[in-house]
Amino acid sequence: MISVHLDVEAVRADFPALARKVRNDKPLIYLDSGATSQKPVQVLDAERSFYERHNSAAHRGTHLLGEEATDVYEGARAKVAAFLGADAGEVVFTKNATEAINLVAYAMSNDRSGSFRVGPGDEILITEMEHHANLVPWQQLCERTGATLRWLDVTPEGRLDLDDLDSMITGRTRIVAVTQQSNVTGTIPPVAEIVRAAHEKGALVLADAAQSVPHQPVDVAALGVDFLAFSAHKMLGPYGIGVLFGRAELLEAMPPFLTGGSMIEVVRMEGSTFLPPPQRFEPGVPAVAEAAGLAAAVDYLTALGMGNVAAHEESLTAHALDALSEISGVRILGPDTTKDRGGAVAFEVEGVHPHDVGQVLDELGIAVRTGHHCAWPLHRALGVQASTRATFYVYNTHDEVDALADGIRYAQRFFQAG
Ligand SMILES: Cc1ncc(COP(=O)(O)O)c(C=O)c1O
């Protein structure tokens, strides 16, 4: 049953890549949007049109094209801010979610005077469920500063173990960094509840929204987070641009991350002063065409309605959980219902290595991801080395979910497993 609010065939027509035939003329079944989404013509057109008409360095030229490029760039910022329920000044453009998280982690070790300074005795709390992008930067921060890294465990079902939340957040916790939707198990942790517990103890909260902003309505004010990070390329937009949302007073207090042109106020040989945020965090000539593409992606998703996007994915996920759980020898990693769960369905097939599953599926035209999906500790916690992962988006259909299930059965027969 496809959500009545989303005309999937009309959506699919906007994505040229989905019309491809692959591997001996089979229709492409793209189930790897968790890695990166396909891009609609509206996004491709927005980038092309920028290059054809307005190409110029934003915030630099004193000519018409420079003004237009600045308008495109700042217009994109305003659009992203409205999409998140933030103010434009709270939206920093970065290269991707990874850079956005590194920006905050670096600021916390580079604050020579202020409130961000982290040192021995301080604690950083993360979870075992994190993508490496929201794990390694915090390990590195602790190594640089002498702070202690702590983490919340996951339950065998792939949810966060919150029993010890109150004791794990202490008066020494400086920041809690948590995913808003796991890229492996699809788990959606209760971020608002974690925010309340953290704020009670004076800790900040960063949400890794790389897998949530593309797939569910996200309002930073309602969530109460201090920082939130995501990438355009997972939400129908281009590579090379991501977003760090930061509460205005926090960004104001933060030292810069990367430095150079476009982020300075006054430069003398003896030293420099820096612009207010968000420019303070955006050195160099900005990625304006990418910002135009991101703005077009936001328009596209807004026109579909994020509630409809989430409902469509929920129905695909429910179908996938049903279809896969009927196959003997298949173990789904993570929750087996759609409650507080998004559309990442990772699984193992008894007796068949994930890479072999992926290869057989690829021969059938079905693109999935195999490996540890940059979440190695999570795989260890769930007792597997690696898994096969299908991820769904606005253009996927229930027939594609059935094809996945048939493909897994075929792989089992091929390898005489199951
Ligand atoms: C949950 C999560 N966080 C962070 C990232 C990092 O995103 P990027 O590689 O675009 O910086 C990913 C990418 O897969 C992700 O799934």
Image (spheres, helix red, strand yellow):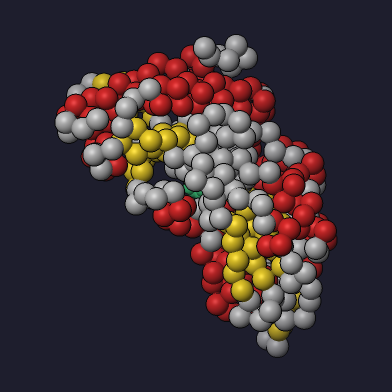
Nearest the eye: 271 or 168 = 168
Q: Which residue reaches farthest bottom? A: 270
Q: Residue 71, percent across and down?
A: 71, 44
Q: Quadrant of residue 16?
A: top left
- Residue 146 higher or lower than 35, as above or below: below
Horizontal and vertical percent position of residue 248:
81, 57
Q: Please give the name of the residue rendered at 61% of the width and 80% of the height, measured from the top-left corner.
A: 146
In the image, residue 115 sits, relative to residue 90, either above or below, namely below
Q: Which residue lies at the image location 65% right of the left edge and 51% below the top edge? A: 162
Compared across the picture, whether 368 is left or right of 159 comes to left
x and y, in percent, of residue 399 in the image? 40, 16
Assign the C terminus to one quadrant of the image. top left
Residue 362 lies in what quarter of the image? Answer: top left
Q: Nearer the viewer, residue 355 or 235?
A: 355
Q: Is residue 56 above or below residue 255?
A: above
Of 261 and 253, nearer the camera is 253
Looking at the picture, does residue 395 appear above or below residue 119? above
How many numbered circles does the render carry?
Answer: 0
Give the residue drawn at x 44%, y 17%: 398
Q: Is residue 265 left or right of residue 20?
A: right
| Residue at the image point whose x is 53% and y is 14% from the top | 2
Residue 249: give x, y in percent of width and height.
83, 61
| Residue 200 in view of the camera | yes
Q: Nearer the viewer, residue 45 or 218?
A: 218
User: Is residue 32 visible to the viewer in this orientation of the structure?
Assistant: no
